[in-house]
């Protein structure tokens, strides 16, 4: 069995996430305390009690999701699990890449929380509310979606290739709406405008990319204990400088998740664990490659099941 750990991105948050990990495992509770201290905010209370609209704010959701993922990792490690002994690769969907890197030791939990707070704020501030948009395109080939984006203008691009026939486009509101209409005309099963606060993973995020370049220059990354598969290159990376460059590129680049899951299957990985809140990535993995075994580790019972399965 060859295993990869994957870490979810924004949209997987839910009020109550991580609470039973904190109650069951002291090492998990310590993660939430460390994040609260790093941010000078009682983020864990928002995570466990809400309100949902406060948790969903980009600046809160990003470090909160990382905290749950790392709480699960620390809970496993407190019971004797060693990541480098059991896991071949790590990868994360968008902000989940930061969680993957924290799990693999590239960044401390405190630094990761601060970086994600900066990332969330910078992404939100990059484009005035209402000027950007994103749309999910279901059931259309990537080449056709790319052609629709080119026809609609320069300010729209593919932001996420999630697999299972789902692509997300992002950019200026008018071009995104135009591209979505073209996709419908080309035969897309659905073209759905998404309720988002900013056009993530588009060229309009350039100011946020620069903010992350500056923020990442203030931390000292270590080589990960297992290779990470960055969203923008879909190849194993261990060099800290390359990792930082890819994180900057990721802000304006596409999340190539379908290719990531396919890469795992083509390089000997047969089991994917989704570490953190929700089951989005597990669902995507099953649609991309039905031969992969998937499992989730986001609550205490799943930690215990994973420890039993992994030995």
Image (cartoon, helix red, strand yellow):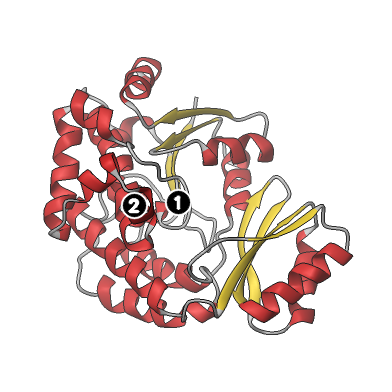
Q: Residues within 10 Å of mark 1 (few under 14, many from 20)?
A: many
Helix, strand, or loop for circle 1? loop
What secondary structure is found at the residue carrying circle 2?
Answer: helix
Foreground pick, 307 / 2:
307
Viewer-nearest residue: 33 or 261: 33
| Disc number for residue 88 | none
x, y percent for residue 88: 43, 38
Tell whether label 2 touches label 1 (CB within 8 Å). no
* Position above or below: 62 against 252: above
Judged left or right of residue 133, residue 218 is left
Which of disc 2 and disc 1 is earlier in sequence? 1
Q: Is residue 14 above or below residue 141?
A: above
Which residue is drawn at the image coordinates 65% and 73% (left, top)?
A: 157
Rendered position, 161 above or below 209 = above
Q: Which residue is mark 1?
A: 9
Q: Nearer the viewer, residue 81 or 159?
A: 159
From the viewer's perspective, tell me whether residue 142 is left or right of residue 216. right
- The image position of residue 301, as x and y in percent, is 34, 19
Q: Report the quarter where the C terminus lies.
A: top left
Q: Which residue is mark 2?
A: 55
Q: Which of the pair 72/130 is nearer the observer?
A: 130
Task: Give the side of residue 213 with respect to residue 200, left or right.
Answer: left
| Residue 90 x, y percent position in the rendering | 42, 44
Q: Residue at x 53, y 41 (%)?
A: 281
- What residue is shown at x 56% (from left), y 30% (from top)? 270
Image: 240 above or below 298: below
């Amino acid at each position: 069995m060859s295993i990869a750990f994957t870490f979810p991105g924004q949209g997987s948050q839910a009020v109550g996430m991580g609470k039973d990990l904190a109650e069951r495992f002291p090492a998990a509770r310590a993660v939430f305390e460390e994040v609260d201290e790093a941010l000078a905010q009682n983020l864990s209370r928002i995570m466990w009690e809400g309100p949902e609209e406060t948790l969903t704010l980009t600046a809160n959701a990003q470090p909160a999701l990382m905290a749950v993922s790392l709480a699960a990792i620390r809970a496993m490690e407190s019971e004797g699990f060693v990541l480098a002994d059991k896991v071949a690769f790590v990868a994360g969907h968008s902000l989940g890449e930061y969680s993957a890197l924290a799990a693999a030791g590239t960044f401390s939990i405190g630094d990761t929380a601060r970086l994600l707070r900066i990332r969330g704020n910078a992404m939100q501030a990059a484009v005035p509310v209402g000027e950007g948009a994103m749309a999910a395109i279901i059931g259309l080939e990537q080449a056709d979606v790319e052609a629709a984006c080119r026809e609609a203008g320069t300010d729209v691009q593919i932001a996420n290739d999630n697999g299972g026939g789902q692509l997300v486009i992002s950019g200026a509101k008018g071009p995104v709406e135009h591209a979505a209409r073209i996709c419908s005309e080309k035969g897309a099963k659905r073209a759905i405008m998404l309720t988002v606060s900013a056009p993530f993973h588009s060229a309009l995020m350039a100011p946020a990319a620069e903010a992350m370049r500056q923020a990442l220059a203030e931390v000292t990354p270590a080589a990960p204990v297992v290779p990470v598969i960055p969203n923008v290159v879909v190849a194993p990376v261990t060099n800290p400088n390359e990792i930082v460059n890819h994180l900057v590129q990721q802000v304006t680049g596409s999340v190539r998740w379908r290719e990531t899951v396919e890469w795992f299957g083509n390089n000997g990985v047969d089991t994917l664990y989704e570490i953190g809140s929700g089951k989005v990535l597990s669902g995507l993995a099953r649609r991309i490659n039905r031969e992969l075994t998937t499992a989730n580790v986001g609550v205490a019972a799943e930690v215990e099941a994973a420890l039993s399965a992994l030995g």
